Amino acid sequence: MRIEVDQLKEASAPFAKNYAPAELQLEDDFMRLASEAKVEGRASKKREQVRMQGTINASVEVDCDRCAAPVNVPVNTDFDVTYLPLEALTVDAEATELQEDDLNFAAYEGNTLDLDVLAREQILLALPTRQLCREDCQGLCPACGANLNTQTCGCEQQDIDPRWAALAALKKT
Ligand SMILES: [Zn+2]
Ligand SMILES: [Zn+2]
């Protein structure tokens, strides 16, 4: 959804958008929306600065870091992002530095601001960097790819740390 910058005023105006899972791409291969994402908030403009404040409620399906099983992660996050015109950011070094240091600054180009990008970024920010399906997930066998949570395979001996293997050999003698 696009926000028309020249229609914004100093008094904040509400906006709301519900994204169907297919409408908002996250990281294609290993995370996607599990259900509708609700984005709502208020937008205001002071001179050229646009401020977008609001909340996002979503449910994201993320692949387990070890076994790739899908895990549902609820996302309930607030945002407060100030947008500056791209021209101002590239000309004004101070503003550019601000933007680099602070995730709460972003740029808009021309007369529109893309709410899809904002929603996507905020959802990704709210997600943990590593997600396991459960604390003690056994992961996949590195040799044959078997899911070790649900099956065993014949490769276990190859997974043994060589130092332990040496120790085990010592014990036998
Ligand atoms: Zn797992
Ligand atoms: Zn195996």
Image (cartoon, grey):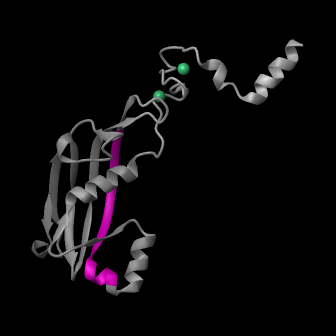
Against 40, is 82 above or below?
below
**What residue sits 45% from the left and 71% below the top?**
101
Q: What stretch of residues is rendered in magenta?
A: 74-90
| Position of residue 165 measured from the top left corner of the image (x, y, whole percent) | 76, 23
In the displayed structure image, the side of residue 69 where residue 157 appears, left or right: right
| Position of residue 144 measured from the top left corner of the image (x, y, whole percent) | 51, 23
**What residue sits 44% from the left and 33% below the top?**
64
Against 75, is 140 above or below?
above
* Magenta-colored stretch includes residue 89: yes
**What residue sits 23% from the left and 36% below the top?**
35
| Position of residue 46 measured from the top left corner of the image (x, y, whole percent) | 22, 79
The image quadrant where one finds ligand 2 is top right
Most extreme residue toward the left is: 7
* Magenta-colored stretch includes residue 27: no
Against 32, is 81 above or below?
below
**Quarter occupied by residue 57:** top left
Main SS of residues in magenta: strand
Q: Nearer the viewer, residue 146 or 38?
A: 146
The quarter of the rendered structure image containing the C terminus is top right
| Position of residue 141 measured from the top left corner of the image (x, y, whole percent) | 53, 25
